[in-house]
Image (cartoon, rainbow, N blue to C red):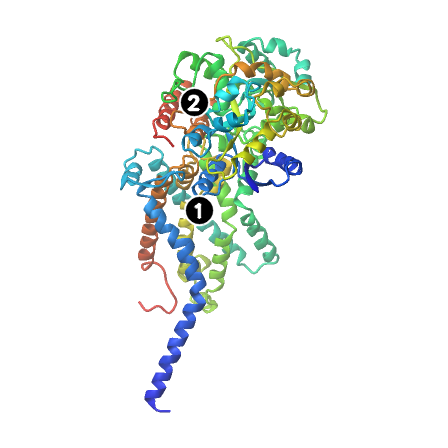
């Protein structure tokens, strides 16, 4: 076969493969355009309108965004700050707790598989069931936690979910209980098991202790895993909704009124669909912004094997 | 032809399963399809979305929670023309029933189920007897009720083990008390908050005393009906539905119980909040006559008695239902509440029709006051500002 014909043949094959690739991906792509991108574009349009479903949208320009960002909506900034505070506290605790648990479960000890299952089980609890369970545990008058605390001698037991001061910490405890042994831990476990054992052998031969091995071998090697969990963790924390909706309905006194709960109530209780769309787009921009910062900063601390620096 | 019925989930919809086959048997040619939608407030968002897409039911369950706003948005069809055409006799309907369903002079629905919110006391007779408390004495005045509640509250090891009285929360729980003291939540136009009046403040102070001295912790996620059924609460601020929730089925003979009206307040009135779970006709129905046929069937006193006796709904605001002998003799709460129906105080509609949003905010802002984390003066400043902000919003 001549070189020219071979090249043509290769080019035809490449084109055919290309077309096949697009065809196989087309159901997902079509679905993305119809069910995701299309509604997103429509919601972007709605964010510039006054719209309450029962009548046609009427264009009001940037008013919805001004209403939110100017503070005219007295719940906008507090709910945003509250959501970020939540993320700043819960994400590091969840990551460090999950990593510690993964390290413990990575030990080759008898019964490790059983412990892995036990630690993972809470994460399988649906968020609604989790909220109901902890509502009972935290119940100030009859709940087991306050019962045990009073037996231990505490006179004024906390009000937990009934107090605007302890409601947020209570939700954090609920969330961390389910999060620490869950998917994040599993991913960390996989990351830990992917660290080449030769590195530990080399470190041992150089006389490195366990702490030194952790900080100079384990941590650098699992930075990609940490980065992935960090990004997913931040996005998940900013989207907190179900536990607050079920356990406290955003109370007491808006103490757990997170951003997505505010968006939900604006849309489905107040029927301000145009304004709710604006809230959704503000949130989208914020998440993209923080994810971009995360990705940019990751170049300075995430180590990928085989990466030339 | 097919008529679609939109009902919220729960006993209202469950009873349709029984009535639909009976109605279809009596009306061949009419097929009824029941579309069970989520409970409130999601129910209203669903109705709006279905209306926008032309898929809303012909027959719509419509409680006062969003009734007026939807009537003004022309989601419901006025019934006056069809009532006149059918020569339907409305004389049996109570005035508060029809006036609460009338918007700008037009009747948009029928008062299928009506109640007065929390204006009664459900009490554990055995606990009252143990402490020598007579309900007739306890309900002579609000002060007497408070004194009885405190007497019936027991503690052990610094923790309450028995609760004297658990108030109802939200606007539906508070307004009857506030009205008993002569106050209101807002002015008649529903635009200006009126909770700072001395009368309203007196009612709120009474509720605060109860929460503080005789009740469970507010917002603790406890179901007071379950606690009552377990014999841990002596008295509960009750409404019509409490005769079924918990009801004899849950109490199961553990103790004797009954229901009595709240006392008259300083305004010489037992405060009420007339609430209707109405039924309406969609403005885009293609089968108005057939839909009207089923609406009349739902309002029929014979069917009403069945529904009410079995906890499927509240009694229609019709005298033949309210004064029905069977309901009066067989049901604990019915005979207690009925004397108040004809003089019931109206449903308090905010001027901008944002009642669900307002009611959610009521529990949010009053929570710190009920749990003692804010003093009543400091708490009420916050209450006033947050609730007025909602009343100031444009129409939903």
Q: Please, is residue B96 above or below residue A282 in the view?
A: above
Q: Looking at the rendering, which quadrant does residue B338 occupy?
A: top right
Q: Please, is residue A203 above or below residue B82 in the view?
A: below
Between A144 and A22, the residue placed more toward the observer is: A22
Chain of the residue under label 1: A
Residue depicted at 49% across the width and 30% down the height: A162
The residue singled out by tag 2 in the image is B105
Distance in Å between CA atoms under marks 2 and 1: 60 Å
> In the displayed structure, does residue A42 sit left or right of residue B337?
left
Between A82 and A301, the residue placed more toward the observer is: A82
Residue B189 visible, this angle: yes
Residue A286 visible, this angle: no
Residue B7 is situated, as x and y percent measured from the top left of the image, at: 55, 36
Q: Nearer the viewer, mark 2 or mark 1?
A: 2
Q: Residue furthest bottom?
A: A1
How packed mark 1 is, by other alpha carbons closer than 10 Å (few <14, some 14-19, many 20 or more), is: some
The residue singled out by tag 1 in the image is A93
Residues beneath discs 2 and 1 located on the same chain: no
Classify mark 1: helix, strand or loop: helix
Residue depicted at 34% across the width and 84% down the height: A7
Is the residue under label 1 in contact with that under label 2 (CB below 8 Å)? no
Residue A285 is situated, as x and y percent measured from the top left of the image, at: 32, 48
Quadrant containing the C terminus of chain B is: top left
Classify mark 2: helix, strand or loop: loop
Q: Which mark is residue B382?
A: none
Chain of the residue under label 2: B
Q: Please, is residue A114 above or below residue A175 in the view?
A: below
Residue B24 is situated, as x and y percent measured from the top left of the image, at: 64, 38
> In the displayed structure, does residue A232 sit left or right of residue B392?
right
């Amino acid at each position: 076969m001549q070189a020219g014909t071979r090249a043509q043949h290769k080019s035809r094959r490449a084109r055919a493969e290309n077309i096949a690739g697009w065809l196989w991906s087309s159901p997902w792509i079509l679905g993305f355009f119809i069910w995701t991108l299309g509604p997103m574009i429509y919601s972007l349009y709605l964010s510039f309108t006054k719209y309450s479903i029962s009548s046609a949208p009427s264009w009001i320009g940037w008013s919805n965004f001004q209403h939110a960002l100017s503070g005219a909506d007295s719940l906008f900034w507090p709910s945003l700050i509250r959501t970020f505070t939540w993320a700043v506290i819960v994400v590091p605790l969840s990551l460090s707790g999950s990593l510690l648990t993964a390290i413990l479960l990575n030990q080759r000890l008898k019964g490790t598989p059983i412990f892995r299952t036990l630690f993972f089980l809470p994460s399988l609890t649906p968020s609604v069931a989790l909220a109901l369970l902890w509502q009972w545990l935290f119940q100030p008058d009859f709940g087991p936690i306050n019962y045990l605390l009073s037996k231990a001698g505490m006179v004024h037991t906390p009000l937990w979910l009934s107090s605007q001061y302890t409601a947020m910490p209570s939700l954090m405890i609920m969330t961390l209980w389910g999060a620490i042994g869950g998917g994040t831990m599993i991913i960390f476990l996989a990351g830990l098991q992917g660290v080449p054992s030769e590195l530990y052998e080399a470190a041992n031969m150089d006389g490195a202790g366990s702490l030194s091995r952790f900080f100079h071998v384990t941590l650098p090697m699992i930075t990609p895993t940490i980065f992935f969990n960090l990004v997913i963790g931040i996005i998940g924390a900013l989207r907190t909704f179900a536990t607050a909706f079920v356990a406290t309905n955003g109370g007491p006194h808006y103490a757990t009124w997170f951003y997505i709960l505010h968006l939900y109530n604006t849309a489905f209780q107040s029927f301000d669909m145009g304004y709710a769309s604006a809230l959704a787009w503000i949130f989208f921009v914020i998440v993209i912004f923080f994810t971009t910062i995360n990705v940019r900063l990751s170049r300075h601390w995430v180590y990928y094997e085989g990466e030339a620096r | 032809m097919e008529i679609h019925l939109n009902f919220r989930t729960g006993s209202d919809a469950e009873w349709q399963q029984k009535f639909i086959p009976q109605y279809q048997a009596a009306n061949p040619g009419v097929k009824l399809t029941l579309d069970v939608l989520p409970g409130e407030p999601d129910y209203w968002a669903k109705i709006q979305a279905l209306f926008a897409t032309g898929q809303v039911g012909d027959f719509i369950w419509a409680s006062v929670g969003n009734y007026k706003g939807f009537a003004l948005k022309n989601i419901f069809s006025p019934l006056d023309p069809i009532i006149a055409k059918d020569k339907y006799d409305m004389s049996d309907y109570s005035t508060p029933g029809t006036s609460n369903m009338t918007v700008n002079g037009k009747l948009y629905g029928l008062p299928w189920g009506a109640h007065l919110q929390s204006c009664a006391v459900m009490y554990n007779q055995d606990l009252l007897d143990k402490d020598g408390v007579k309900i007739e004495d306890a309900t002579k005045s609000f002060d007497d009720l408070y004194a009885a509640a405190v007497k019936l509250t027991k503690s052990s090891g610094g923790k309450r083990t028995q609760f004297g009285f658990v108030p109802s929360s939200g606007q539906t729980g508070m307004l009857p008390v506030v009205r008993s003291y002569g106050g209101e939540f807002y002015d008649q136009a529903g635009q200006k908050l009126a909770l700072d009046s001395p009368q309203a403040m007196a009612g709120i102070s009474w509720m605060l005393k109860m929460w503080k001295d005789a009740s469970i912790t507010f917002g603790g996620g406890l179901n007071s009906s379950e606690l009552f059924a377990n014999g841990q609460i002596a008295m509960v601020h009750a409404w019509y539905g409490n005769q079924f929730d918990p009801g004899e089925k849950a109490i199961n003979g553990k103790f004797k119980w009954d229901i009595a009206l709240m006392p008259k307040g300083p305004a010489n009135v037992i405060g009420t909040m007339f609430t209707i779970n109405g039924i309406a006709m969609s403005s885009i129905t293609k089968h108005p006559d057939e839909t009207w046929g089923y609406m009349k069937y739902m309002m029929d006193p014979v069917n009403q008695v069945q529904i009410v006796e079995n906890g499927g709904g509240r009694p229609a605001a019709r005298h033949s239902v309210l004064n029905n002998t069977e309901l009066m003799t067989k049901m604990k709460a019915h005979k207690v509440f009925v004397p108040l129906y004809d003089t019931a105080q109206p449903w308090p509609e905010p001027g901008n029709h944002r009642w669900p949003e307002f009611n959610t905010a009521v529990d949010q802002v009053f929570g710190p006051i009920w749990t003692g984390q804010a003093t009543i003066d400091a708490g009420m400043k916050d209450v006033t500002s947050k609730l007025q902000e909602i009343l100031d919003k444009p129409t939903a």
